[in-house]
Image (cartoon, rainbow, N blue to C red):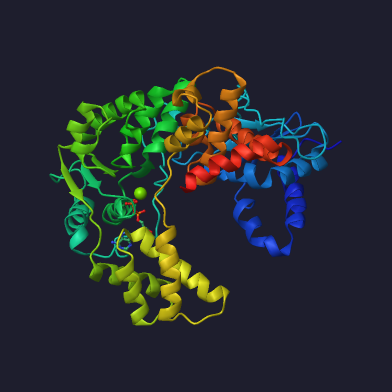
Amino acid sequence: MKIESDYQKVWASCLEIIKDNLGKENENQFKTWFEPIVPVELRDSILTIQVPSQFFYEWLETNFMELLKRTIREILGPQGMLKYSILVDTSIVGKPVTVRIPSTGGGQNTQNAPRDVPFPTGVGSSRVPINPFALPGIKKVKVYSQLRDTYSLDNFVEGECNRLARSAGFAVAERPGTTAYNPLLLHGGVGLGKTHLANAIGLKTKEFHPEKTVLYVTSEQFMQQYAEAGRNNTINDFVHYYEMIDVLIVDDIQFWAHKAAKTQEAFFHIFNHLHQRNNQIIITSDKSPSELVGLEPRLISRLKWGLSADLQAPDVETRIAILKQKLHNDGIEMPYDVIEYIAYSINTNVRELEGALVSLMAQSSLNRKQITLDLAKQMIDKFVKNSERDITIDYIQKIVCDYFSLPVDSIQSRTRKREIVQARQLAMYFAKKLTKSSLATIGMQCGNKDHATVLHACKTVANLAETDKTFRYYVEEIEKRFKD
Ligand code: ADP
Ligand code: MG
């Protein structure tokens, strides 16, 4: 049996095993996913490790669960457990800790869904991350802004399509909270640069005003944090935390439409508080305020207080300029006729434009072919045909329920009827497969389940599809419907 005195030593031994298992060829994976982990405690054969974010944790669960399980058992013996402490994305640290209980059977055991065990009280030694909410009297905690360096204003190519939004953004960065552009609402279709620009304004603000607290959150994160605060009885702390931000950026607010009524209400109060104190609010949405149905009317009326600036699809000159910039940043050269061809063929949005460029470069390097106009033509034709609309979780639920002739809202119900449980699991499985949503979001939208349930559902479906013919047929038939 191992001595439980030194969590650091234990983790160091784990790392050795993990590194060894991953091998030289996966050194990057080791660097990315294991080096940032900080061991925080060892108690009763439970090793607590701190990971930087929910996403990070999910990634470990999805990709390295078996390895971690084996390693922990090897070092701590059969009772060994691993507990994650998630330093959540917005510096809201010390969130609930998930305890991963290794299954006792050997090999993969999908029946053993990961279990969430609430953060045991009393474990809050000084090594366990402290919740900044819980520090009385501390006004300024260090807020991790969540801004991405690559989404800068310098990288944001200017064109007719974004001139107003861009210059309003610049003004806001210079004088946050004191221009008429409060809130600044950036709206426009997918892939037109809302996230990039909002992020760029945040970075620019930091440049002009290093002392200001800037925070970028997606509306989805905000909603999850709110739900979690509700579960932990920390709503007040949640609200106070947001109320001390100088420049608050909330991305994709349309996500709250037709749901999240409580979240919207909480945000409404935070909005008022910040606005009264001349703190800046920046919001993005894929719809203009008047088209934003499903949001609280009083919230929509607030959004109209400042400036709403739209981002439009770029014209061909701007598209060429964007392509050139991307190539320049990556240090890649490409014949001008190819650039032009791409710019003329892809006129939907910037994301697809970038996608086409990346595919073309991948094609050429995989097949060791020169990038020529011919290659570009072949690839773009395929690309344009294949570029599909984004599939939403709602749409997936509808397809699955239609297939089994169930009412769509049955997925939200609490019933344990087998057919409904199965439909829900299938919806979760396809949502994981076909969208970029996190496990937590999928769970929330499929009957308010947690991420562990989603993970379990995905495994169950994959397993059944392998072992049960009828079930496999269902999966294939449903999958076909997404392709129509
Ligand atoms: P949205 O949030 O509106 O869906 P994003 O901000 O995610 O769109 O933009 C999609 C991609 O296109 C990103 O990689 C972004 O960097 C790029 N992009 C969008 N607009 C521009 C622009 N004007 N200049 C350079 N890159 C852009
Ligand atoms: Mg976006």
The answer to whether one can see residue 415 in this image is yes
Report the residue at 37% width, 32% height from top. Answer: 241
Q: Quadrant of ligand 1?
A: bottom left
Q: Nearer the viewer, residue 389 or 72?
A: 389
Image quadrant of residue 329? bottom left
The answer to whether one can see residue 436 in this image is no
- Furthest-left residue in view? 180
Report the residue at 24% width, 47% height from top. Answer: 186
Percent of width and height locating residue 130: 52, 33
Image height of 210 relative to 106, above or below: below
Q: Nearer the viewer, residue 284 or 312?
A: 312
Task: Give the left or right position of residue 50, taking residue 358 as reference.
Answer: right
Percent of width and height locating residue 300: 21, 32
Percent of width and height locating residue 144: 42, 45
Report the residue at 87% width, 36% height from top. Answer: 1
Report the residue at 39% width, 28% height from top. Answer: 238
Image height of 296 relative to 389, above or below: above
Percent of width and height locating residue 86: 55, 37
Q: Nearer the viewer, residue 76 or 63?
A: 63
Q: Give the number of marks.
A: 0
Task: Give the left or right position of residue 156, taking residue 118 as reference.
Answer: left
Task: Give the left or right position of residue 168, taking residue 405 as reference.
Answer: left
- Furthest-right residue in view? 1
Task: Give the left or right position of residue 354, taking residue 173 as reference.
Answer: right
